[in-house]
Each structure stands twice: as C-alpha cells, then as structure tokens.
Image: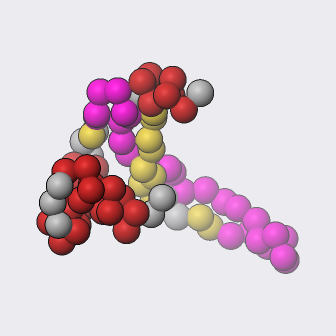
Amino acid sequence: MNKGDLIDVVADKAGISKAQAGDAVAAVFGAIEGTLKKGGKAAFIGFGTFSTNRRAARDGRNPATGATIKIPAKTMVKFKAGKALSEAVN
C-alpha cells in the first residue's frame, strides 16, 4: 500500500472525496512528523508508537575500497507495533 492507496481507502470508508481524504491523510502525517521533530512520541493504542532515537557518529568502511569513512550522527525514527496490530498480522 502506498499513500495513494491509503487516500482511496480513507475516501471510500469515510464517504468523502479523494481531495478531502488526501487532506486528512496529509494532516495525520504532518501531525506525527511535527511531534517527532519536537522529540516527542506519537502513540496510537492498538496500532503502535512512533518515536525517535539519536544515533552517535561512528566510523565505517567503504565496501568498495575498504577505506575508513566518518558516518555522521543522526536522529532515527522508530516504530514499535502495538499488541493488537501484532496479533492481527499473525
């Protein structure tokens, strides 16, 4: 499923236009992104939790040449599936 498929499903289930569904999906994604940018967590009971984790700078290797390279620090997004979602998939 991609974003277009999600918009189609939301429009069908909610009985709204695809434009309105697109706005709703964009608003949800924007709200989650804004929360994560502020360092918060976005938790949805039964679905899962989005959070961030800081990864420290480290040394790595270029697989083609074997040369040592510096990998910069960055913030990673994590998702932990909720119990209901995990059970629904299994």
Q: Does the magenta stretch include residue 58?
A: yes
Q: Position of residue 19 (x, y in %)?
A: 18, 71
Look at the image and tell me whether residue 24 can be seen: no
> From what the image shows, is residue 35 above or below residue 71?
above
Q: Where is residue 18 in the image (x, y as percent from the top left)?
A: 22, 68
Q: Residue at x 61, y 56 (%)?
A: 58
Look at the image and tell me whether residue 80 can be seen: yes
Q: Which residue is drawn at 42% across and 54% down?
A: 75
Q: Where is residue 49 in the image (x, y as percent from the top left)?
A: 36, 35
Q: In this view, does 53 lie to the left or right of 23?
A: right
> From what the image shows, is residue 71 above or below residue 49?
below
* Nearer to me, 28 or 70: 28
Q: Name the residue furthest right.
A: 65
Q: Is residue 44 magenta?
A: yes
Q: What is the tally of numbered marks visible in this picture?
A: 0
Residues in magenta? 43-69
* Nearer to me, 77 or 71: 77
Q: Is residue 66 left or right of residue 69?
A: right
Q: Where is residue 56 in the image (x, y as percent from the top left)?
A: 51, 51
* Nearer to me, 56 or 39: 39
Quarter occupied by the C terminus:
top right
Q: Is residue 47 left or right of residue 24?
A: right
